Image (cartoon, rainbow, N blue to C red):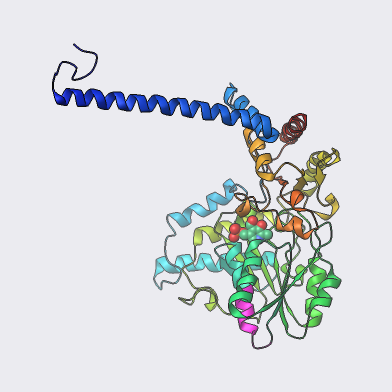
Amino acid sequence: MGAWPGASLPTAGGLLIKFGITFCLNNFIVFLCLFTSSLLYFLFLSFLYFPINSVLLLRFFCFLGRKQQVRTVYLDFNATTPLDPEVKEVMLPFLGEFFGNPSSIHRIGRKVRAQLDDCRERVARVWKCSASEVIFTSGATESVCQAICGSARFLKSKGRHLITSSIEHHAVLNTVEYLVNKEGFELTTLPVDTEGRVAPQDLDNAIKDDTILVSVMAANNETGAIQPVADLGAICQQRGVLFHTDAVQWFGKEPFESIHQFNADLVTICGHKFYGPKGSGALFIKSPLLPDPILFGGGHENERRAGTENLAAIAGLVEAIERFVPTPVFERSRLELLNCRLSSMGEIDGINLLCPLAKRLANTASFTVPGIDSMTQLAALDLDGICASAGSACSAGSLNPSHVLSAMGRSDNEANSLVRFSLGRETTEEEINLVLASFLNFVEQVRVF
Ligand code: PLP
């Protein structure tokens, strides 16, 4: 038997097969040589010219060589929290037994309607407002959009001037930008100080006769900076202007007495930031305000938000509100101790801590490391099993400088190097020690190269 298939055939077909196989093999060998040499060349270049890449590559090879599995440390609780197991239990009947549509007249529908009404009453009890002032939504993005677009359109005959701050989440920034570009509204964007806080005086100065709406967040998701939101709301009340606050990062973290503590007409919250389900949110709309709807369809949510209610999400949200808001689930005293330890990284030369702990959320510590971009830092941490973030989750996949840091007057180099650690109920001292060891080791390695 010949070595080649078809070797015994002295025909043109045999020759053709021989030629074909030789041709493929040759090409494969050439490809292999090129691939190996370009890989070696790439490695050589990486080591020669890009010290940060070299450190990353070294760490990657160490990662491949590890015998045990790397322990995962989750420090991205501002992006989302896990669903609390007891909250999940409360949701399950709505994925089974209570499947009815709350708008149906029959008994199956009525049973679910009763549950929905009860959910609204329970939120109203925690918020200390009337049940008709609570609207359930699909999350913060929808609540923000409803609050801002709905109010601006409702009030446009009175004026077209809107005010927001330069450190808002993109849910707010892109909504106001849309209103300016597509619907002829005018916008003033308030600056922040070097710690990322809005000054009430700046708001007072910015309000004009035709100002109809102000939107400023309660706490910033990237730096944790807490805003003087009650003071801002009071100014709006005095000047007769509507005030909306995106309180997504406040709930479950900061003290909560009643929804009126923000002096706001509209308050946005969402469930997955305090151990509730994703796709759940609510909007407080102070009576008798009636913003225009942004969704059109049935008369759900007292004609204010069309679409069949997602009872599982609503039940989970309400359970999380009751359990985790009046007594914040992010326990300040415990998290503050862990955060102090983590924040000690800011004392190291070349690592800058943003915003003093007394003025920020106790669970958030953000740093800049000029010269090492956010993506590189996140990749290095990830190789050690540490999940952190470069700021808001939706911009984590891009290399755009943080708009929050730019607003705080930081250079592009610094704004490109943000890393945010956000702690949660599950965070332990041991985890913080792992983060300190990993991060400091990485920064040191980059320096040595
Ligand atoms: N507002 C703030 C302050 C946030 O942190 C987020 C999410 O990170 C949102 C709004 C948008 O939330 P969602 O994407 O859940 O709608």
Residue 117 on image: x %, y %:
55, 69
Q: How many labels does the image show?
A: 0
In magenta stretch: residue 157? yes
- For this view, does 352 lie left or right of residue 265? right
Vertical position of residue 177 compared to residue 14: above or below: below
Say which quarter of the image contains residue 434: top right
> Residue at the location (25% across, 25% down)?
19
Residue 314 on image: x %, y %:
55, 61
Quarter of the rendered image showing ligand 1? bottom right
Residue 44 on image: x %, y %:
62, 28
- Tell me if residue 217 can be seen: yes
Q: Give the range drawn in magenta.
A: 148-158
> Residue at the location (72% across, 53% down)?
222
> Residue at the location (84% across, 67% down)?
199
Secondary structure mainly formed by the magenta segment: helix
Say which quarter of the image contains residue 60: top right
> Residue at the location (66% across, 35% down)?
380
In magenta stretch: residue 225? no
Name the one closer to the observer, 4 or 408. 4
Q: In which quarter of the image is the N terminus?
A: top left
Residue at the far bottom in the pictured view: 157
Name the one closer to the observer, 259 or 238. 238
Q: In which quarter of the image is the C terminus?
A: top right
- Tell me if residue 132 can be seen: no
Vertical position of residue 91 compared to residue 165: above or below: above
Name the one closer to the observer, 386 or 325. 386
Say which quarter of the image contains residue 419: top right
Residue 184 on image: x %, y %:
62, 81
